[in-house]
Image (spheres, grey):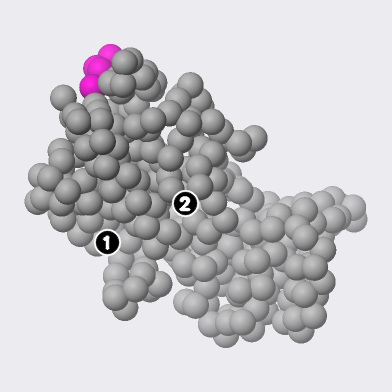
Amino acid sequence: MIDVLIIGAGPAGMSAAIYVQRAGKQAVLLEKMTFGGKIVNTPEVANYPGLEMISGFDFAMNLYNQATKLGAKVEYEQAMKIEDVDGIKKVHTASGKVYEAKAVIIATGAANRHLGLAKEDSLVGKGVSYCATCDGAFFKGQDVAVNGGGATAIEDAMFLANYCKKVYVIHRRGEFRAPEVEIAELKTKGNVEFILNSTVTKLLGDGKLEGVEIYDSKSEERKTLAITGLFVAIGQEPANSDFANVADLDDKGYVLATEDCKTKTPGVFTAGDCRTKTIRQLTTAASDGTIAALAATLYISQQGK
C-alpha cells in the first residue's frame, strides 16, 4: 500500500513528494498530463527566492529530478474518484486502475481561463501572460494592457503601473467587480487608462505581441492598441468536482481548506492553487506542499499505519 498518494505533479505536488520521501514514507504522484503544471509554460521565473532566473521548464525538471531521486514515483493517470473505506483511501483512475493509500494530497492546481483567440497559445511568454506578479517586471517601461474586471485584474493593473509606461485596463462591462477602494486607488495612477464595455477580439503580431484589436459594444467600433504585453485576468478554473465527497468545495470549485491544508476527511489533504487562498504563487504552492506532506506523514504515524 502507498503511504501518500498525491494527485497532481505541479509545484505543490512535487514539493509534497520531496517532503514525504524525506520523512521516510513512499510518495506516488498521479498526473494526467505532464509534470510541472502551469509553470512549465513560463519562459522565465525570477521571483523564487534563491533563484535569480530560471526557465519554468528547468524549474519543473529540477523539482521532478529531486523528487524522483529521493524515491518518489510518478504515474501518468487521471484520478477520477477518492473513496474512504475504513480509513484506506482508494483512488480510482480513468484507466480503471485503483490505488490504495494511507493518505491522499489533492494538488490538482487551477487552469487559467483563456480568451480563446487565435495566436493566444503561441504568444504565451511572448507578450501574453496570465500572471502579472510573475512576468510584470519584464515589461518595465513598456505599454501593456490588463484584460479583466475583477479584483485580480485591478490588483494586476496596480502592480504593473509601478513598472510600465502605460497600463490599459480592458473590461467587457461598464463597472468593475472589485472593491471600490482598490478601483479608486488605481484611478489615481497617472499612467492607467480604463477601456470599458470592450473586449479583446484579436491579437496582433507574429512571434511576439505587437498589439490588440478591441471592440466597443456601445459604439460598435473597433480600434487597435499598440502594446507589447497583455495580462489576461479573467479567472481560473479548478478541477475538483470529482473529489467533492471527501473535500468540501466553495462556490467556484476550490477545495475549502485553511493554511493547515486539511479537508473534511481525515487523511485527505490539499495543496496549491486548487484550494481556497488569496495568493497563488510558486512560493505558496511549495509552502502548501510542505505543510500537506508533513501533515500527511504525521497522520500516518498517529494512525499507527
Inspect this view and state whether residue 123 appears: no
The amino acid at mark 2 is Glu
Q: Which residue is mark 1?
A: 59
Q: Quadrant of residue 297?
A: top left
Front-lying residue, 185 or 20: 20
Residue at the image position 53 percent from the left and 59 percent from the top: 279
Magenta region includes residue 125 = no
Quarter of the image with the C terminus is: top left
Task: Say left or right for 258 vs 185.
Answer: left
Residue at 38%, 38% in the rendered image:
269
Residue 95 horizontal side relative to residue 130, left or right:
left
Please provide the residue range marked out in magenta.
95-100
Give the quarter of the image for residue 102: top left
In the image, residue 149 lies at what x, y percent? 73, 56
**Which residue is labeled 2 in the image?**
259
Left or right: residue 12 compared with residue 163: left
